Amino acid sequence: MAREFQRGHKAKISDLTAGTDLYVGVSIAGPGLTFDISCFGLDANEQLSDDRYFVFYNQPKSPEESIQQLGAQAGDSESFRVTLDRIPAGIHRLSFTASIDGDGQMSQIGPGYIRIVAGGEEVVRYSFTGSEFSTERALMIGDFYLKDVWRFAAVGQGFDGGLAALLKNFGGEVAEEEAAPEQQVPAQATGAPGFAPPPQAAAPAPSFGAPAQAPAQAPAPAAAFAAPPQPAAHQPAAPQQQPVHSAPTMVGPLTTPPAAPYGQPPHPPQQPGPPSYGQVPGRQPGYGGQVPPPAPAPAPYGQQPAYGQQPPYGQQPSYGQQPPYGQAPGQAPGQVPGQQPAAGAGLAAALQPYKEAPTGARWTPQNQQLMRVDLSMGGQAVLARQGSMVLYQGKVDFSYKGAGFAGRIVGNATGQEMQLMRCTGRGQVFLAETGAHLHAIELQGDGICVSAENVLAFDESLQHEVRRIEGHGIPGGALFTMQFQGSGTVIVKTHGVPVVLPVTPTTFADSNAIVAWSSASQVIISSQVRLRRNAYPGHSGETVNLQFRGAPGNFIVVQPYEV
């Protein structure tokens, strides 16, 4: 009896069947829609490093025929033969996909499935419907993947774009297919595909049925390989003329251009001006945000922009800069609140200010409360606070990231415990939490101290540990914080817009308002600290203050809120 899989379910092939010569059937249909169903043979990096292992309508088999496209048969829209023990060692994943050829979207499809048949018996089936998708034009249905042994996963992940977008996602490049001469079209329809069922077959389709005119072209199938019989009513009619696909054909593997420095958008280098206080030379200005290159020169340190001064059109005001009087944040100049933008009318114009921001870097703020990370850039996982994902695109896996027994003991004792999830794959994840303001801080070998409560996410490459701040006047004898070091990005969340101040011998901060500081800063307990006593009349309410010292270049980050 076939096992029914749900999206995300995985299993070893050996637990499903002892055979390695497998039939894979895919069914997908929608009113007025035409589909291209393909199989991508990917390497260990999930890239199409050898275009001969892209099996589709224009290339129906791999070189050694371990992957073969058979056509529609036995009630399936498309079928494949996969011989696992013949797949080369360089292929680690077979991804079965469907893309719409022409107009349409995946929300229009009816019930569909992918199934595996071994020895004439269906062993697993994963079903899906169009209600699970929206405007996507491609679908990653299911995968065979090698992890010690071959396994199967029900993916069911929608993908924006069509076949060309899938190719680029897997590292291939495309070129538009040239139109075929008119006199060649009838010649393409005269013969059935090499492994299609013969036109006379109204009974259950054979496993590897070949046209009666050319029996020698059919490879000898394994004895156990056979698709399960189906009622005659479900058998496809005689093969009709093959549609002329307008989808692009693959040319070869995509050569990835040289990447920009980690965490920076690929803009041409600009002549830097004098950096503001606490800014590392060569890095973009502005705490926690990425400002486009043609930004105006910043005002002197600590000085607000002139009244009515605006950033360039389409650029968000930097932290601390207010829009002109009467203009709401994000509102176009001259736009009346509550009315649609003057640039156009209708739904598209109304939603234009909220569209996804262009991404040229691994981490990209979409607004002050929403951060996007592109997992396909940088090649490493992201650790994020559990439950902080609000949406994702592409193929992303989420798993629990435990701190271990010792880590839990330290976290509970110090108050610096972080409940984390690990995000991996090839896609984009959007992170947020309770509307807090988010700031991406890139580390390039330096370090920063942040309270665990203020950490939303960070690159797994960063080293992090609990740091102790000694103090005789503090209840319990010490304060604790998290210290991050290495190369990568940490996302810090604050209540409201923070202020970044340089560290001087007279810099003090409330321990309940401080968010972060450079790890090279020296932190001591202020001599003015007094413990709160209810019997003490006229108490100021300030219990614990921290004094910061350090060489020029050190900084502190303080939020307008006390925890």
Image (cartoon, rainbow, N blue to C red):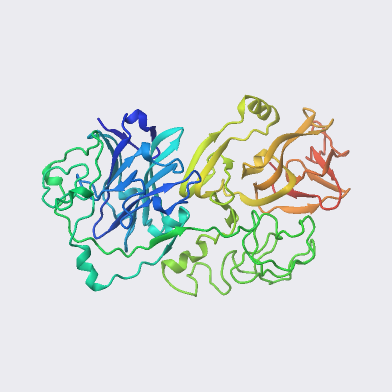
Q: How many marks?
A: 0
Image position, residue 455 (x, y; %) = 64, 43
**Quadrant location of the C terminus?**
top right
Is residue 162 at all visible to an observer of this figure?
no
Horizontal and vertical percent for residue 62?
36, 49
Q: Is residue 260 left or right of residue 187?
A: right
> Which residue is at the front of the view, 542 or 297?
297
- Camera-side residue: 307 or 79? 79
Q: Residue 518, position in %: x, y?
A: 77, 46
As drawn, is 212 to the left or to the right of 338? left
Q: Which quarter of the picture shows residue 470?
A: top right
Q: Position of residue 98 (x, y in %)?
A: 33, 52
Residue at (18% x, 42% y) in the render: 206
Q: Nearer the viewer, residue 215 or 148?
A: 215
Q: Residue drawn 68% across and 59% down?
A: 319
Q: Dividing the picture into quarters, in which one does residue 241 lie?
A: bottom left
> What residue lies at 59% left-to-right and 65% top-to-bottom?
328
Question: Residue 233 or 216: which is nearer the viewer?
Answer: 216
Residue 371 left/right relative to 472: left
Q: Residue at x 75, y 65 (%)?
A: 304
Question: In the rendered image, is residue 503 in sight?
Answer: yes
* Image quadrant containing the N terminus: top left
